[in-house]
Image (cartoon, grey):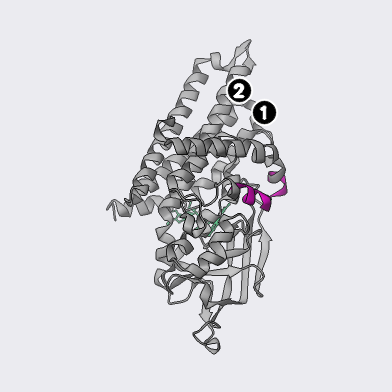
Amino acid sequence: MNGFWTEEQVALMDSARSFVRAEVAPHLQEWEDAGSVPRELHATAAKLGLLGLGVPEELGGAGGTFLDALAVTEAFTEAGASSGLLAALFTSGIALPHIVASGNADLVDRYVRPTLAGETIGSLAITEPGGGSDVARIRTTAVRDPSTGSGQAAEYVVNGTKTFITSGVRADFVTTAVRTGGPGHAGISLLVIDKGTPGFTVDRSLSKMGWHCSDTAELGFRDARVPAANLVGAENTGFAQIAQAFVVERLALAGHGYGIAARALALTAAYCRERETFGKPLIANQVVRHRLVEMHRRVDAARTYTRAVAARHVAGENPLVEALHAKALAVEAAAYVCDQAVQLHGGTGYLHGTEVERHYRDARILGIGGGATEVLDDLTARLLGYGA
Ligand SMILES: Cc1cc2nc3c(=O)[nH]c(=O)nc-3n(C[C@H](O)[C@H](O)[C@H](O)COP(=O)(O)OP(=O)(O)OC[C@H]3O[C@@H](n4cnc5c(N)ncnc54)[C@H](O)[C@@H]3O)c2cc1C
């Protein structure tokens, strides 16, 4: 299995596993119950070079490529972290890419560097109560106030509501999709909005089926005045910027999927060796062994495929269809494997605090967040030319 990774990546994974065993696993249930991850964890992860993998060091990142980030995801889940923990600790992975790609030195200094140093937390706010799948229809508006001119003092006035925003309760700033132009995707921009901006409120902390340690917010903007200097990239190019980050976002969520599935499988295989029914270990039953094999097959297929697609992405290709397939395969693997893991743990698998129960609940979001399976399949059909 290690044959895929370089020596540096193997060392990085060792360090990530040690971090999870020492700093995460002993506290995870407490954070699940509290509904959030402590801010200090970000600083500790940053010191170990675990935040900002794939972001150049000149911009405050840890260097390396997305493959390093994927290696860390595998190591985290192998050592007992959850998909929710990954979502909360690495929200920078969705909040910052557009700022990094914009090359805007001022925004990099104000948002990218402190976040990747673990000092601040950022979120990405696209989804609205009216719908998340159809990004082109977002309704939150940002209107330039002509009285503020076009120089340093220029401001947008933002109105609208965002929902389901990961780390939105804790976030110091939110990279927000807003409508600056006409209807459809061509009228969308990205604007960074600071916590503390008058008119910007965290209206609700949402309670969820899974991802319990990852706080999720509903955010309100009522005449919130935001400096035009916080615009990411050119006005009305937000949709293209969001789309540009899709390949990495989908591969990252695929990593969550096969990562928690691999962990659930390992826990289940160990449990089946130890647990006895009818006077023999569970694993002595052929039907149980076959189930474990099926679980392994699905994890391995999703993992091997995702790694290969990630390698192609890092090599400079644009594997759009393959990244969509990777997410779909990993979502299915996670759903099947985590379900079977609970089944083979029996009543114990249904108890809060049993790790496979957490993975079972966490797995459910993966086919909804980052694009619902049906919406992504539709996109895949279009990319493959299977149009109606
Ligand atoms: C825990 C969590 C964290 C999240 N984090 C973030 C975040 O950080 N930032 C952010 O912006 N968003 C976030 N989201 C929002 C997420 O991206 C959306 O929930 C997702 O895009 C689906 O949007 P929706 O919930 O509005 O569902 P809808 O768009 O209302 O769709 C509902 C369901 O209908 C089906 N469907 C939709 N369209 C079609 C179609 N054309 N054909 C067939 N079936 C269809 C799908 O099954 C879909 O799940 C998060 C969501 C959750 C639950």
Q: Is residue 10 above or below residue 275?
A: below
Query: What secondary structure is the stretch in magenta mostly built from?
Result: helix
Q: Residue at x 65, y 56 (%)?
A: 206
Label 1, ligand 1: CB separation under 8 Å: no
Q: Which mark is residue 271?
A: 2
Q: Is residue 264 above or below residue 278?
A: below
Image position, residue 82 (x, y; %) = 59, 41
Task: Name the secondary structure under disc 2.
Answer: helix
Instruction: Magenta stretch: give its range.
Output: 32-45
Q: Quadrant of residue 330?
A: top left
Do the residues under discs 2 and 1 have CB atoms within 8 angstroms? Answer: yes
Q: Is residue 185 above or below residue 149?
A: above
Image position, residue 297 (x, y; %) = 43, 29
Task: Name the secondary structure under disc 1.
Answer: helix
Q: Residue at x 57, y 36 (%)?
A: 17
Badge 1: residue crowd in 10 Å (few <14, some 14–19, many ≥20): some
Residue type (three-letter) at the residue carrying disc 2: Tyr
In the picture of the structure, the residue carrying the numbered disc 1 is 348
Is residue 34 rendered magenta in the image?
Answer: yes
**Quadrant where the image shows the C terminus:** bottom left
Q: Is residue 249 left or right of residue 341?
A: left
Q: Is 27 in front, or is 118?
A: 118
Q: Earlier in the sequence, mark 2 or mark 1?
A: 2
Residue type (three-letter) at the residue carrying disc 1: Thr
**Quadrant where the image shows the N terminus:** top left
> How many numbered marks, from 0 up?
2
Distance Cα–Cα, label 2 vs label 1 = 10 Å
**Which tag is nearer the camera, tag 2 or tag 1?**
2
Residue 36 visible? The answer is no
